[in-house]
Image: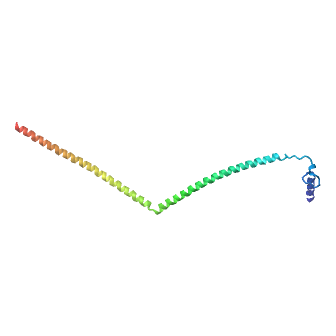
Amino acid sequence: MLSSLKEKILNVTQNVPLFNLEEKDPTTKGTINVNAGADILKHFQDQWEELHNINEENARCANQVGQEIDTITSKISADKENICLITHILSNSNLSGNISNYLSTIKDLYKTSEAVEKQLIQLECLIEETEFKNLKIQHQYHLQQYRFAKGRIIEEF
């Protein structure tokens, strides 16, 4: 196995002019094509530029997302504080008891207002009856005056 590996290495060194084992002048090997890797280099440079642009765009997007996260975080913290305050107020105050007391007071006021309304209607009826009686008395008085005046006129004839 080692012998075949040694043969391969020797074969490569003889066929590929990368290894300069002999003391030859490297400039005498022939013409060198300096543009040999230009297309490959251009390809990788273009890919690198594209990756770089994508990376910059990702950085801008990450910055925007970070700002949005900060905004949402501050809003959530404020909402959490408000919820804690509301919970504290509801749990430590007698709000539900006060509300039930106010509702019963409102019911009592409603009943009282209905009773007052009924009494006002009765008062209006009583006032109307009294006015009618006063009007009746006035008419009876005028009728008596008329009868008395007619009686005197009849007596004078």
Along the viewing direction, whichever of 32 and 65 lies nearer the viewer: 32
Q: Specify the farthest residue to the right.
A: 23
Q: Quadrant of the C terminus?
A: top left
Position of 34 with respect to 123 (left or right) is right
Position of 31 with respect to 85 (left or right) is right
Image position of 133 with respect to 98: above or below = above
Picture residue at 34% right of the left edge, 54% below the top? 111
Image position of 89 with respect to 150: above or below = below
Q: Quadrant of residue 3?
A: bottom right
Q: Quadrant of the N terminus?
A: bottom right
Q: Tell me where residue 92 appears, x and y as whole percent.
A: 47, 63
Picture residue at 69% right of the left edge, 50% below the top? 56
Q: Tell me where residue 105 appears, x and y as whole percent.
A: 37, 57
Along the viewing direction, whichever of 113 and 18 lies nearer the viewer: 18
Q: Quadrant of residue 76?
A: bottom right
Q: Specify the farthest residue to the bottom.
A: 92
Picture residue at 41% right of the left edge, 60% below the top? 98
Position of 137 with respect to 76 (left or right) is left
Q: Tell me where residue 146 appears, x and y as whole percent.
A: 12, 40
